[in-house]
Image (tube, rainbow, N blue to C red):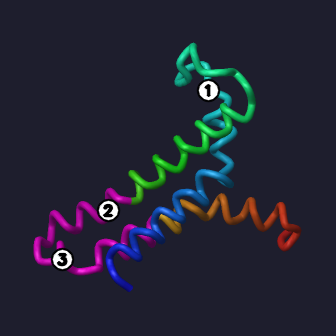
């Protein structure tokens, strides 16, 4: 796969985690702290922005190991290796969301 295809995979994993992660409810519970006063206090708006925060955090947190490897091994900057590390860490961060989807679908009890 090309670098941009792996990056698209990372973005997809971040979106998946942002929608189905159990942390979305925790972030939504603290919406009084992060939400500006002009934002509507409707549940759909709170869920949307909470989901966006979790997805962005997943994207940033999973990119840290890839950035450290690119920094430690300068020859790997053009190789697809750090992107695969980024995707692997994003997948690990998606495990709670995957368990939640499996529980909701009834595939796991």
Residue 67 is situated, as x and y percent measured from the top left of the image, at 25, 61
Mark 3–mark 2 distance (CA, rounded to whole Å): 16 Å
The structure residue drawn at horizontal position 75% and vertical position 63%, both measured from the top left corner, is 101
Depth order, front residue of 83/23: 83
Q: Is residue 76 left or right of residue 61?
A: left
Mark 3–mark 1 distance (CA, rounded to whole Å): 40 Å
Name the residue beneath numbered marker 3.
78
Residue 11 is situated, as x and y percent measured from the top left of the image, at 47, 62
- Please report the bounds of the magenta region as a residue range: 63-89
- Classify residue 108 by image quadrant: bottom right
Label 3 secondary element: loop
Label 1 secondary element: loop
The structure residue drawn at horizontal position 61% and vertical position 35%, both measured from the top left corner, is 27
Residue 85 is situated, as x and y percent measured from the top left of the image, at 36, 72
Q: Which circle's residue, 3 or 1, is located before the other in the chain?
A: 1
Q: Is residue 15 above or below residue 37?
A: below
Quadrant where the C terminus lies?
bottom right
Q: Which mark is residue 30?
A: 1
Q: Depth-wise, is mark 3 or mark 1 nearer the camera?
A: 3
The structure residue drawn at horizontal position 65% and vertical position 52%, both measured from the top left corner, is 19
Q: Which circle's residue, 3 or 2, is located before the other in the chain?
A: 2
Quadrant where the N terminus lies?
bottom left
The residue furthest bottom is: 1
The structure residue drawn at horizontal position 54% and vertical position 46%, both measured from the top left corner, is 54
Label 2 secondary element: helix
Q: Are marks 1 and 2 in contact (CB under 8 Å)?
A: no
Q: Which circle's residue, 1 or 2, is located before the other in the chain?
A: 1
Q: Is residue 38 above or below residue 24?
A: above
Mark 1–mark 2 distance (CA, rounded to whole Å): 28 Å
Name the residue beneath numbered marker 2.
65
- Classify residue 49 by image quadrant: top right
Q: How would you rate the neighbour count of disc 2 (Cα within 10 Å): few for under 14, some for 14-19, many for 20 or more?
A: some
């Amino acid at each position: 796969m090309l670098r941009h295809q792996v990056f698209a995979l990372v973005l997809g994993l971040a979106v998946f985690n942002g929608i189905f992660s159990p942390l979305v409810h925790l972030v939504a519970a603290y919406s009084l702290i992060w939400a500006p006063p002009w934002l509507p206090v409707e549940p759909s708006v709170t869920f949307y922005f909470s989901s966006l925060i979790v997805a962005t955090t997943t994207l940033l947190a999973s990119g840290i190991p890839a950035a450290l490897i690119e920094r430690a091994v300068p020859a790997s900057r053009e190789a697809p290796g750090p992107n695969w590390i980024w995707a692997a860490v994003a997948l690990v961060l998606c495990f709670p969301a995957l368990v939640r989807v499996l529980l909701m679908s009834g595939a796991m009890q």
